[in-house]
């Protein structure tokens, strides 16, 4: 299959699969009366796209079967961990972020607003982010070593996400009187958002393993996916949105002065003159 054919096939699979997942998510959201369920569906949407693409690629005899299942397994492990984490973190109520985005509770603004502002946007974003995998499984591996490197980057990302989330959960489990004002130990000593940094690494790693390892053409055609994901995580729905709230908390501005915002770096020290 040519690069163009792989891109078209991957795009069709990604869009249609994502649409189905978001329709199901919309039905669940309506039944529960809250939009936040989309956070759990996000990872499952990406896994569904990867799985459908892999099954179709293997069935049609396109691509390399070993890599198709390898990258699909990597997406699945990441997605299931994330979905479980988001589901467990929920308390059965709506996330204030979504009420602010919608302009009120779901029951008041209506399902149509939620579809337009949340579910359609999330579905399209998932289709774009999944393109390296959805198209890559239909292509032949050109550089096997890049598959190895990509999975190494993916593993680093999964480590940062998993450990970062665990450290944050342990911090929140402490009483407010006993815990420090901000979490500044463990991975949080080197980056203010280890979980978001890990998420970016996961998708850069999958781009390397699933797309760039097939050649420069497919890599260049799909690099928008990890770039977009990183932009979301740094500037908009991830760290950028969270920082606006966190900067108002006692101790956080001082923490921000000495700690890297995204990429893990040694702690900065103040110099006095």
Image (cartoon, helix red, strand yellow):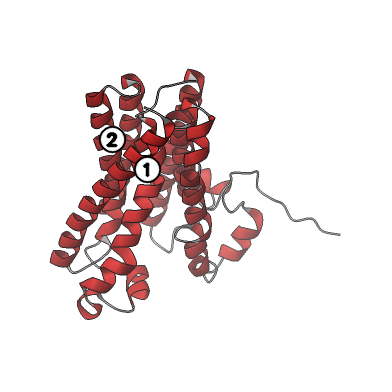
Identify the residue at horizontal 72%, vertical 52% (top origin).
Answer: 269
Residue lying at the far right of the rendered structure? 273
For marks 2 and 1, give the CA distance.
Answer: 10 Å
Residue 212, image x and y in percent?
A: 49, 31
Q: Residues within 10 Å of mark 2 (few under 14, many from 20)?
A: many
Please tell me which of labels 2 and 1 falls first in the chain. Answer: 2
The mark found on residue 266 in the picture is none
Residue 92, image x and y in percent?
A: 21, 63
Q: Secondary structure beneath disc 1? A: loop
Q: Secondary structure beneath disc 2? A: helix
Pick the front one: 139 or 225: 139
For residue 232, above or below residue 143:
below
Residue lying at the far left of the rendered structure? 31
Residue 114, image x and y in percent?
A: 27, 69
How many badges with numbers are in the image?
Answer: 2
Residue 219, image x and y in percent?
A: 50, 35
Q: Is residue 80 visible?
A: no
User: Which picture quadrant has residue 80?
Assistant: top left
Q: Which residue is mark 1?
A: 130
Do residues under tags 2 and 1 come within 8 Å of each other at their CB atoms? yes
Pick the front one: 265 or 5: 5
Pick the front one: 225 or 33: 225
The mark found on residue 53 in the picture is 2
For residue 199, above or below residue 54:
below
Q: Is residue 211 visible?
A: yes
Pick the front one: 139 or 46: 139
């Amino acid at each position: 299959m040519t690069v163009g054919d792989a891109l078209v096939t991957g795009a069709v699979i990604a869009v249609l699969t994502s649409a189905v997942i978001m329709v199901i998510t919309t039905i669940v959201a309506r039944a529960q009366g809250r939009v936040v369920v989309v956070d759990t569906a996000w990872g499952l949407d990406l896994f569904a796209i990867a799985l459908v693409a892999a099954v179709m690629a293997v069935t049609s005899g396109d691509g390399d079967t070993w890599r198709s299942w390898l990258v699909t397994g990597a997406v699945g492990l990441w997605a299931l961990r994330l979905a479980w984490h988001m589901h467990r973190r929920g308390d059965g109520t709506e996330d204030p972020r979504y009420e602010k985005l919608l302009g009120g509770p779901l029951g008041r603004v209506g399902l149509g607003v939620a579809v337009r502002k949340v579910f359609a946007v999330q579905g399209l974003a998932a289709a774009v982010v999944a393109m390296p995998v959805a198209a890559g499984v239909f292509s032949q591996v050109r550089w096997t070593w890049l598959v190895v490197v990509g999975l190494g980057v993916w593993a680093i990302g999964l480590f940062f996400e998993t450990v970062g989330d665990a450290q944050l959960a342990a911090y929140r489990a402490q009483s407010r009187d006993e815990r420090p004002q901000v979490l500044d130990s463990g991975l949080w000593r080197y980056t203010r958002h280890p979980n978001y940094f890990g998420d970016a690494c996961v998708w850069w790693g999958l781009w390397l393993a699933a797309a760039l390892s097939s050649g420069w053409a497919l890599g260049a055609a799909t690099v928008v996916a990890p770039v977009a994901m990183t932009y979301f995580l740094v500037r908009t729905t991830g760290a950028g949105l969270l920082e606006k709230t966190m900067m108002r908390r006692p101790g956080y501005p001082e923490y921000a002065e000495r700690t890297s915002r995204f990429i893990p770096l040694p702690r900065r020290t103040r110099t006095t003159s």
